[in-house]
Amino acid sequence: MSVIYVLLAISITVAIIFFVAFIFSVKNGQYDDSYTPSVRMLFDDEIVKSKKTSQETELDQTLEINN
């Protein structure tokens, strides 16, 4: 039973260390992105292909067979 307390203490300590490291990196500007917003309008939008219905797929297969 005492092993659970040791593991719990270690896991909380590691979690606090990672949280402090995250806060430190945010405060130092690690996650700031000042370049992407200025060029975002230059990127082309991706064309999203719609999924074919089963009827359209059958029609395409029928047309391929006939040709």
Image (cartoon, rainbow, N blue to C red):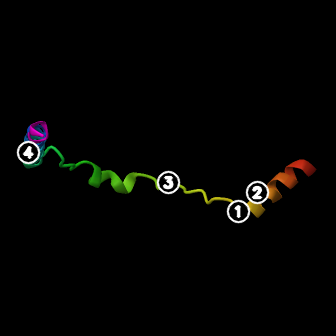
Mark toward the start of the polypeptide (4 vs 3) = 4
Label 4, secondary structure: give it: helix
Comparing 57 with 31, the one in front is: 57
Q: Which amino acid, mark 4?
A: Ile
- Residue annotated with mark 4: 16
Residues at marks 4 and 3 touching, judged by CB atoms closer than 8 Å: no
Identify residue type, mark 2.
Answer: Thr
Please name which of the two marks, 4 or 3, marks the residue nearer to the observer. Answer: 4
Which residue is located at x 34 percent, y 54 percent? 40
Label 3 sits on a secondary structure element that is: loop
- Mark 2–mark 4 contact, CB under 8 Å? no
Name the residue beneath numbered marker 2. 57
Secondary structure of the residue carrying numbered label 1: loop
Residue 46: mark:
3
Viewer can see residue 67? no
Circle 3: residue type: Glu
Q: Residue at x 74, y 61 (%)?
A: 54
Q: Which residue is mark 1?
A: 53
**Between residues 5 and 63, which one lies in front from this camera angle?**
5
Q: Disc 4 or 1, which lies upstream in sequence?
A: 4
Q: Nearer the viewer, residue 44 or 27?
A: 27
Q: Residue at x 12, y 45 (%)?
A: 22
Closest to the camera, between mark 2 and mark 4, is 4
Taking the spot 55% from the left edge, 57% from the top edge, the residue there is 48
Q: Which mark is residue 44?
A: none
Q: Is residue 55 above or below residue 15?
A: below
